[in-house]
Image: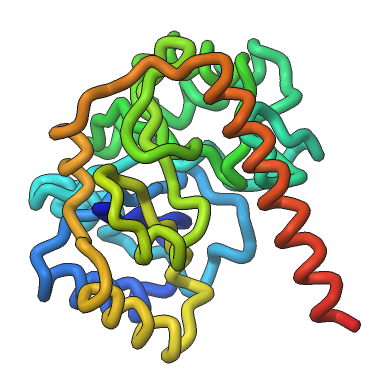
Amino acid sequence: MKIAIRIDGITPEMDFEKFERFKAILDKYDIKPLIGVVPDNKDKKLRKCEPRADFWGYIKNLQDQGWIVAMHGYNHVYNTRKSGMFPISDKSEFAGLSYQRQDEMIREGKRIFRKNGINTDFFMAPFHSYDKYTLKALRTNGFHRISDGFGDGPYELDGMTFFPVAISKSRTLASKEDGIVTFVYHIGAMTNRDFDVFEKLFEKGDIVSFDEFDKYEIRLRTLREETWEYMTARAKYYAVYLRRNLAKK
């Protein structure tokens, strides 16, 4: 199983020291990831420093080097406790809001991107949560690709192409099947041990640039597969929820 890399929570106030450390590992192996850039960050957890003055130029340079930029929500704050179509979380910036409101948020996010020289048709939802209105608003605003869902390759659903994330990193590394999935990283929360584990990943797995997905056929998602994905995502949510609560005892 091939593995592409996704980095969440890219903002002008992120921990750039950790980001550069992560980037150095990717550069060492010539890997180009998918990065989720927040257009107008309001999430205090993603504010690790003073805003970087050359942030948008820095992101544009990465894009010019082959890194794929996705719009990562709008403000990166949750507005509802809805799980949406991919119930791996219990909160959402988008799911549960009206179509009109979601359209406004996505349109404004794209305006900010364009103002700063970033063009993309790729989206990733904060908290992995979106609903039918989110997908409709994305299509209306020129987005056609989204990073989420489960599977072993890209698939089409509701007029969008989905690029799946891994259900389990350990299971993916052990798999001998053909296919490709995404490993998700939140660099700001990574420890020294996490960085060591990440670098060893290149010895264990077949790590590829994100554009490797383009070599795979885009399959139409069936209702059966959609149901399986929903149930698997919900099961993963409860497994994480129980593990966290047991750890607190």
Counting from the top left corner in percent of width and height, residue 183 is at: 39, 57
Specify whether residue 11 is in view.
no
- In the image, residue 248 above or below residue 71: below
Q: Residue sitting at 21 percent across and 57 percent down?
A: 58
- In the image, residue 2 above or below residue 22: above
Q: How many marks?
A: 0
- In the image, residue 238 above or below residue 40: below
Specify whether residue 72 is in view.
yes
Q: Residue sitting at 54 percent across and 66 percent down?
A: 47
Counting from the top left corner in percent of width and height, residue 153 is at: 32, 36
Q: Nearer the viewer, residue 170 or 177?
A: 177
Counting from the top left corner in percent of width and height, residue 180 is at: 29, 45
Counting from the top left corner in percent of width and height, residue 9 is at: 47, 56
User: In which quadrant of the rendered image does the C terminus lie?
Assistant: bottom right
Q: Residue sitting at 28 percent across and 22 percent down?
A: 218
Q: Residue sitting at 81 percent across and 64 percent down?
A: 242
